Image (tube, rainbow, N blue to C red):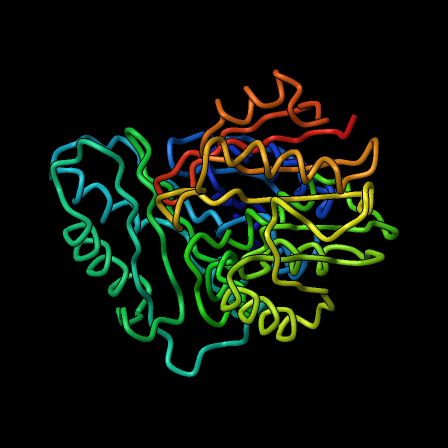
Amino acid sequence: MTDKVYDFYATTVAGLEDLVVADLRGQLKEIDRVRVERGRRHGRIHFRYERSPRRLLDLRSVENLFALVGEARGLTVGPQSLDRIASGLRGMAWGPALRLFDALHGPPERPAFVVTPHLDRGRRFTSGEVCRAAQAALSSSLSLSADPSHPSYNIHLHFVRDRALVGLQIFRGRAWKRPYRRVPRPGSLEGTVAYLIGRLTEPGPRDRFLDPVCGAGTTLIERGLTAPAQILLGGDADRDALTAAREGASAAGVRICLACWDAACLPLRDGAVDRLTANLPYGKQVAPLRGAEPEAALLREMARALRPGGLAVVMAADAKAVEGIIERGEAALRVVRTLRASIRGVRPTVFVMKRL
Protein backbone atom coordinates (compact mmCIF):
# COMPACT_ATOMS: atom_id res chain seq x y z
CA MET A 1 0.00 0.00 0.00
CA THR A 2 1.43 3.39 -1.00
CA ASP A 3 2.00 6.05 1.64
CA LYS A 4 1.36 8.88 -0.84
CA VAL A 5 -1.62 10.19 -2.77
CA TYR A 6 -1.36 10.25 -6.55
CA ASP A 7 -5.02 10.18 -7.59
CA PHE A 8 -7.05 13.38 -7.58
CA TYR A 9 -10.27 14.76 -8.96
CA ALA A 10 -11.40 18.31 -9.63
CA THR A 11 -14.87 19.78 -9.93
CA THR A 12 -15.60 22.23 -12.75
CA VAL A 13 -18.35 24.36 -14.23
CA ALA A 14 -20.52 22.11 -16.40
CA GLY A 15 -19.82 22.56 -20.09
CA LEU A 16 -16.27 23.85 -19.63
CA GLU A 17 -14.64 20.52 -18.77
CA ASP A 18 -12.57 20.38 -21.97
CA LEU A 19 -11.10 23.82 -21.25
CA VAL A 20 -10.12 22.69 -17.76
CA VAL A 21 -8.50 19.50 -19.07
CA ALA A 22 -6.45 21.56 -21.53
CA ASP A 23 -5.40 23.91 -18.73
CA LEU A 24 -4.45 21.02 -16.44
CA ARG A 25 -2.32 19.50 -19.18
CA GLY A 26 -0.64 22.86 -19.69
CA GLN A 27 -0.03 23.57 -16.00
CA LEU A 28 0.74 19.99 -14.90
CA LYS A 29 2.46 18.44 -17.89
CA GLU A 30 3.01 15.11 -16.11
CA ILE A 31 -0.65 14.30 -15.39
CA ASP A 32 -1.91 10.91 -16.52
CA ARG A 33 -5.07 8.79 -16.58
CA VAL A 34 -7.31 11.77 -17.26
CA ARG A 35 -11.02 10.93 -17.21
CA VAL A 36 -13.97 13.34 -17.47
CA GLU A 37 -17.42 12.93 -15.90
CA ARG A 38 -19.94 15.44 -17.25
CA GLY A 39 -22.95 16.55 -15.22
CA ARG A 40 -25.83 18.98 -15.57
CA ARG A 41 -24.47 21.48 -13.04
CA HIS A 42 -20.87 20.38 -12.46
CA GLY A 43 -18.25 18.26 -14.12
CA ARG A 44 -15.53 16.14 -12.55
CA ILE A 45 -12.06 15.52 -13.92
CA HIS A 46 -10.08 12.58 -12.55
CA PHE A 47 -6.32 12.43 -13.00
CA ARG A 48 -3.12 10.98 -11.62
CA TYR A 49 -0.26 13.30 -10.69
CA GLU A 50 2.99 12.07 -9.15
CA ARG A 51 5.08 15.26 -9.01
CA SER A 52 5.19 18.07 -6.44
CA PRO A 53 1.70 18.45 -4.98
CA ARG A 54 2.36 22.13 -4.21
CA ARG A 55 1.83 22.89 -7.89
CA LEU A 56 -1.78 21.80 -7.43
CA LEU A 57 -2.42 24.81 -5.21
CA ASP A 58 -1.68 27.15 -8.13
CA LEU A 59 -4.49 25.81 -10.33
CA ARG A 60 -6.97 28.55 -11.29
CA SER A 61 -9.30 26.68 -13.65
CA VAL A 62 -10.93 24.26 -11.18
CA GLU A 63 -13.73 25.03 -8.74
CA ASN A 64 -12.41 22.60 -6.16
CA LEU A 65 -9.77 19.89 -5.90
CA PHE A 66 -9.73 16.65 -3.93
CA ALA A 67 -7.32 13.88 -3.05
CA LEU A 68 -9.20 10.68 -3.88
CA VAL A 69 -9.41 8.60 -0.72
CA GLY A 70 -11.68 5.88 -2.07
CA GLU A 71 -15.15 4.94 -3.24
CA ALA A 72 -18.15 3.52 -1.42
CA ARG A 73 -19.77 1.12 -3.88
CA GLY A 74 -22.96 -0.86 -4.15
CA LEU A 75 -25.18 2.02 -3.06
CA THR A 76 -28.90 2.18 -3.68
CA VAL A 77 -31.39 5.02 -3.39
CA GLY A 78 -32.66 3.70 -0.05
CA PRO A 79 -31.49 4.52 3.49
CA GLN A 80 -29.77 1.13 3.82
CA SER A 81 -26.93 2.75 1.87
CA LEU A 82 -26.04 4.78 4.97
CA ASP A 83 -24.62 1.68 6.68
CA ARG A 84 -22.66 0.78 3.55
CA ILE A 85 -21.22 4.31 3.40
CA ALA A 86 -20.19 4.18 7.06
CA SER A 87 -18.56 0.78 6.59
CA GLY A 88 -16.72 1.97 3.49
CA LEU A 89 -15.38 5.08 5.23
CA ARG A 90 -14.06 3.04 8.15
CA GLY A 91 -12.17 0.74 5.79
CA MET A 92 -10.43 3.46 3.77
CA ALA A 93 -6.76 4.42 4.17
CA TRP A 94 -6.92 8.03 5.36
CA GLY A 95 -3.29 8.52 6.41
CA PRO A 96 -1.81 9.47 2.99
CA ALA A 97 -4.46 12.11 2.24
CA LEU A 98 -4.27 13.67 5.71
CA ARG A 99 -0.47 13.78 5.59
CA LEU A 100 -0.62 15.41 2.16
CA PHE A 101 -2.94 18.13 3.44
CA ASP A 102 -0.72 18.73 6.49
CA ALA A 103 2.37 18.94 4.27
CA LEU A 104 0.69 21.57 2.09
CA HIS A 105 -0.86 23.68 4.83
CA GLY A 106 0.87 22.72 8.07
CA PRO A 107 -0.45 20.44 10.83
CA PRO A 108 -3.58 21.88 12.48
CA GLU A 109 -3.43 22.87 16.14
CA ARG A 110 -6.84 21.36 16.86
CA PRO A 111 -7.54 18.66 14.25
CA ALA A 112 -11.21 18.33 13.35
CA PHE A 113 -13.23 17.50 10.28
CA VAL A 114 -16.48 18.26 8.51
CA VAL A 115 -18.38 16.09 6.03
CA THR A 116 -19.85 17.70 2.91
CA PRO A 117 -22.18 15.40 0.94
CA HIS A 118 -23.27 16.05 -2.65
CA LEU A 119 -26.40 13.99 -3.31
CA ASP A 120 -27.68 13.22 -6.78
CA ARG A 121 -31.38 12.95 -7.55
CA GLY A 122 -33.68 10.25 -6.26
CA ARG A 123 -32.06 9.38 -2.93
CA ARG A 124 -34.42 8.50 -0.11
CA PHE A 125 -32.12 9.89 2.53
CA THR A 126 -30.97 13.41 3.31
CA SER A 127 -27.64 15.19 3.42
CA GLY A 128 -28.05 15.47 7.18
CA GLU A 129 -28.42 11.71 7.52
CA VAL A 130 -25.29 11.18 5.43
CA CYS A 131 -23.37 13.62 7.63
CA ARG A 132 -24.42 11.89 10.84
CA ALA A 133 -23.54 8.42 9.56
CA ALA A 134 -20.21 9.55 8.12
CA GLN A 135 -19.24 11.58 11.18
CA ALA A 136 -19.91 8.66 13.50
CA ALA A 137 -17.79 6.34 11.35
CA LEU A 138 -14.90 8.77 10.91
CA SER A 139 -14.80 9.94 14.53
CA SER A 140 -14.01 6.39 15.62
CA SER A 141 -11.66 5.41 12.79
CA LEU A 142 -9.69 8.69 12.59
CA SER A 143 -9.75 9.60 16.28
CA LEU A 144 -10.80 13.10 15.23
CA SER A 145 -13.77 15.17 16.30
CA ALA A 146 -16.38 16.52 13.93
CA ASP A 147 -16.54 20.31 14.02
CA PRO A 148 -18.53 21.91 11.16
CA SER A 149 -17.73 25.41 12.47
CA HIS A 150 -13.93 25.13 12.60
CA PRO A 151 -12.83 22.11 10.56
CA SER A 152 -9.23 21.38 9.67
CA TYR A 153 -10.22 18.83 7.03
CA ASN A 154 -13.19 18.97 4.66
CA ILE A 155 -14.25 15.49 3.53
CA HIS A 156 -16.56 15.41 0.50
CA LEU A 157 -18.84 12.61 -0.64
CA HIS A 158 -19.92 12.92 -4.28
CA PHE A 159 -22.78 10.52 -5.05
CA VAL A 160 -22.80 9.10 -8.58
CA ARG A 161 -25.44 6.42 -9.21
CA ASP A 162 -24.35 3.31 -7.24
CA ARG A 163 -21.21 4.80 -5.70
CA ALA A 164 -19.91 7.74 -3.71
CA LEU A 165 -16.53 9.30 -4.39
CA VAL A 166 -14.75 10.16 -1.16
CA GLY A 167 -12.28 13.02 -1.40
CA LEU A 168 -10.31 15.22 0.96
CA GLN A 169 -10.44 18.85 -0.16
CA ILE A 170 -6.95 20.11 -1.03
CA PHE A 171 -7.70 23.84 -1.09
CA ARG A 172 -8.39 25.58 2.20
CA GLY A 173 -11.27 27.36 0.49
CA ARG A 174 -12.96 27.00 -2.85
CA ALA A 175 -10.77 28.14 -5.73
CA TRP A 176 -13.49 30.23 -7.35
CA LYS A 177 -13.70 32.40 -4.22
CA ARG A 178 -10.83 34.66 -5.20
CA PRO A 179 -9.32 36.64 -2.30
CA TYR A 180 -9.34 39.89 -4.29
CA ARG A 181 -13.15 39.82 -4.52
CA ARG A 182 -13.98 41.62 -1.30
CA VAL A 183 -17.59 42.53 -2.12
CA PRO A 184 -19.74 40.28 -4.37
CA ARG A 185 -21.49 42.02 -7.28
CA PRO A 186 -24.62 40.84 -9.13
CA GLY A 187 -23.76 39.17 -12.42
CA SER A 188 -20.01 38.95 -11.71
CA LEU A 189 -18.31 35.92 -13.17
CA GLU A 190 -16.71 33.40 -10.87
CA GLY A 191 -12.93 33.62 -10.95
CA THR A 192 -12.55 30.17 -12.50
CA VAL A 193 -14.89 31.02 -15.39
CA ALA A 194 -13.23 34.40 -15.95
CA TYR A 195 -9.84 32.69 -16.03
CA LEU A 196 -10.99 30.16 -18.63
CA ILE A 197 -12.59 32.85 -20.79
CA GLY A 198 -9.31 34.75 -20.73
CA ARG A 199 -7.44 31.62 -21.79
CA LEU A 200 -9.75 31.29 -24.80
CA THR A 201 -8.38 34.60 -26.11
CA GLU A 202 -4.95 32.96 -26.55
CA PRO A 203 -3.21 35.58 -24.37
CA GLY A 204 0.06 37.13 -25.45
CA PRO A 205 2.41 39.72 -23.90
CA ARG A 206 1.58 42.46 -26.44
CA ASP A 207 -2.20 42.14 -26.13
CA ARG A 208 -4.36 45.23 -25.95
CA PHE A 209 -7.14 43.56 -23.99
CA LEU A 210 -10.64 45.00 -23.58
CA ASP A 211 -13.71 44.12 -21.53
CA PRO A 212 -16.32 46.75 -22.47
CA VAL A 213 -18.86 45.56 -19.85
CA CYS A 214 -16.35 44.66 -17.16
CA GLY A 215 -18.55 44.96 -14.06
CA ALA A 216 -16.38 44.18 -11.02
CA GLY A 217 -13.40 43.51 -13.30
CA THR A 218 -12.99 39.78 -12.68
CA THR A 219 -12.06 38.95 -16.28
CA LEU A 220 -9.55 41.81 -16.44
CA ILE A 221 -7.96 40.78 -13.16
CA GLU A 222 -7.75 37.10 -14.13
CA ARG A 223 -6.21 38.06 -17.47
CA GLY A 224 -3.62 40.16 -15.65
CA LEU A 225 -2.78 37.31 -13.29
CA THR A 226 -2.46 34.83 -16.17
CA ALA A 227 0.13 36.53 -18.38
CA PRO A 228 1.60 39.97 -19.19
CA ALA A 229 -0.33 42.28 -21.52
CA GLN A 230 0.37 45.65 -23.10
CA ILE A 231 -2.80 47.11 -21.60
CA LEU A 232 -5.88 45.84 -19.75
CA LEU A 233 -8.78 48.15 -20.49
CA GLY A 234 -12.32 47.94 -19.15
CA GLY A 235 -15.43 49.99 -18.69
CA ASP A 236 -18.98 49.86 -17.42
CA ALA A 237 -21.99 52.13 -16.97
CA ASP A 238 -22.19 51.20 -13.26
CA ARG A 239 -19.85 53.39 -11.20
CA ASP A 240 -20.21 51.16 -8.12
CA ALA A 241 -19.06 48.19 -10.19
CA LEU A 242 -16.04 50.16 -11.37
CA THR A 243 -15.18 50.99 -7.77
CA ALA A 244 -15.29 47.27 -6.97
CA ALA A 245 -13.08 46.60 -10.01
CA ARG A 246 -10.46 49.12 -8.85
CA GLU A 247 -10.44 47.67 -5.35
CA GLY A 248 -10.17 44.12 -6.65
CA ALA A 249 -7.34 44.96 -9.05
CA SER A 250 -5.45 46.72 -6.27
CA ALA A 251 -5.88 43.73 -3.96
CA ALA A 252 -4.67 41.37 -6.71
CA GLY A 253 -1.72 43.57 -7.68
CA VAL A 254 -2.96 43.95 -11.26
CA ARG A 255 -2.84 47.24 -13.14
CA ILE A 256 -5.98 47.95 -15.17
CA CYS A 257 -7.39 51.04 -16.89
CA LEU A 258 -11.08 51.73 -16.26
CA ALA A 259 -13.67 54.16 -17.62
CA CYS A 260 -17.37 54.82 -17.16
CA TRP A 261 -19.01 54.50 -20.58
CA ASP A 262 -21.83 53.22 -22.74
CA ALA A 263 -20.57 49.96 -24.24
CA ALA A 264 -22.66 50.59 -27.37
CA CYS A 265 -20.66 53.78 -28.05
CA LEU A 266 -17.05 53.18 -27.02
CA PRO A 267 -14.60 56.13 -27.00
CA LEU A 268 -12.02 54.03 -28.87
CA ARG A 269 -10.67 54.22 -32.40
CA ASP A 270 -11.35 51.46 -34.92
CA GLY A 271 -9.19 48.38 -34.33
CA ALA A 272 -7.85 49.70 -31.04
CA VAL A 273 -7.64 46.31 -29.29
CA ASP A 274 -6.38 42.80 -30.10
CA ARG A 275 -8.42 40.71 -27.67
CA LEU A 276 -11.86 41.26 -26.19
CA THR A 277 -14.10 39.50 -23.69
CA ALA A 278 -17.64 40.35 -22.62
CA ASN A 279 -20.17 38.81 -20.27
CA LEU A 280 -23.37 40.27 -21.71
CA PRO A 281 -25.74 41.15 -18.85
CA TYR A 282 -28.63 38.77 -18.44
CA GLY A 283 -31.83 39.12 -16.46
CA LYS A 284 -31.39 36.59 -13.67
CA GLN A 285 -28.24 38.29 -12.41
CA VAL A 286 -28.58 41.97 -13.37
CA ALA A 287 -31.08 44.20 -15.15
CA PRO A 288 -31.64 42.88 -18.70
CA LEU A 289 -30.33 44.79 -21.69
CA ARG A 290 -32.68 47.50 -22.89
CA GLY A 291 -33.94 48.36 -26.35
CA ALA A 292 -34.67 46.35 -29.46
CA GLU A 293 -31.92 43.78 -30.01
CA PRO A 294 -29.44 45.49 -27.67
CA GLU A 295 -26.94 42.68 -28.30
CA ALA A 296 -26.64 43.88 -31.91
CA ALA A 297 -25.48 47.35 -30.87
CA LEU A 298 -22.96 45.90 -28.42
CA LEU A 299 -21.56 43.35 -30.88
CA ARG A 300 -21.24 45.93 -33.66
CA GLU A 301 -19.30 48.25 -31.38
CA MET A 302 -17.11 45.44 -30.08
CA ALA A 303 -16.29 44.41 -33.65
CA ARG A 304 -15.43 48.01 -34.55
CA ALA A 305 -12.99 48.31 -31.64
CA LEU A 306 -11.36 44.94 -32.40
CA ARG A 307 -8.60 44.79 -35.00
CA PRO A 308 -9.05 42.51 -38.03
CA GLY A 309 -8.06 38.98 -37.05
CA GLY A 310 -8.48 39.75 -33.35
CA LEU A 311 -10.34 37.40 -31.02
CA ALA A 312 -13.52 38.10 -29.06
CA VAL A 313 -14.91 35.75 -26.40
CA VAL A 314 -18.49 36.64 -25.51
CA MET A 315 -20.77 34.95 -22.98
CA ALA A 316 -24.49 35.43 -23.60
CA ALA A 317 -27.68 33.93 -22.19
CA ASP A 318 -29.59 34.53 -25.44
CA ALA A 319 -27.58 32.40 -27.85
CA LYS A 320 -30.16 32.65 -30.63
CA ALA A 321 -29.99 36.44 -30.62
CA VAL A 322 -26.20 36.41 -30.98
CA GLU A 323 -26.30 33.72 -33.67
CA GLY A 324 -28.90 35.69 -35.63
CA ILE A 325 -26.84 38.88 -35.49
CA ILE A 326 -23.75 37.09 -36.79
CA GLU A 327 -25.65 35.18 -39.50
CA ARG A 328 -27.23 38.41 -40.79
CA GLY A 329 -23.81 40.06 -40.95
CA GLU A 330 -24.74 42.84 -38.52
CA ALA A 331 -21.36 42.58 -36.77
CA ALA A 332 -18.07 41.87 -38.55
CA LEU A 333 -17.41 38.71 -36.56
CA ARG A 334 -17.17 35.01 -37.38
CA VAL A 335 -17.93 32.30 -34.81
CA VAL A 336 -15.12 29.75 -34.55
CA ARG A 337 -16.24 27.87 -31.44
CA THR A 338 -19.17 27.66 -29.03
CA LEU A 339 -19.47 26.18 -25.55
CA ARG A 340 -22.62 25.76 -23.44
CA ALA A 341 -22.04 26.27 -19.72
CA SER A 342 -24.18 26.02 -16.59
CA ILE A 343 -23.62 28.83 -14.07
CA ARG A 344 -25.86 29.61 -11.09
CA GLY A 345 -28.93 28.13 -12.73
CA VAL A 346 -28.33 30.01 -16.01
CA ARG A 347 -27.10 28.22 -19.14
CA PRO A 348 -25.15 30.82 -21.13
CA THR A 349 -23.30 30.13 -24.35
CA VAL A 350 -19.66 31.10 -24.78
CA PHE A 351 -18.89 32.33 -28.30
CA VAL A 352 -15.30 32.47 -29.54
CA MET A 353 -15.30 34.82 -32.53
CA LYS A 354 -12.73 36.25 -34.91
CA ARG A 355 -12.89 39.76 -36.34
CA LEU A 356 -13.37 39.74 -40.12
Q: Give the left or right position of residue 290, taking residue 175 as reference.
A: left
Residue 74 in view, yes or no:
yes
251 or 265, which lies in front?
Answer: 265
Q: Give the left or right position of residue 165, taking residue 263 as reference.
A: left
Residue 82 placement: quadrant: top left
Measured from the top left, where is residue 337 in percent x and y?
65, 25
Measured from the top left, where is residue 301 in percent x and y?
67, 39
Query: What is the residue that sits farthest to the top in this orientation?
Result: 327
Residue 331 placement: quadrant: top right
Measured from the top left, where is residue 199 in percent x and y?
69, 43
Which quadrant would the C terminus be assigned to in this image? top right
Q: Residue at 71%, 50% (x, y): give it.
A: 210
Q: Residue at 48%, 41% (x, y): give it.
A: 13
328 or 182, which lies in front?
Answer: 328
Q: Is residue 226 above or below residue 87?
A: below
Q: Is residue 241 above or below residue 122?
A: below
Residue 7 placement: quadrant: top right
Measured from the top left, where is residue 246 in percent x and y?
61, 71
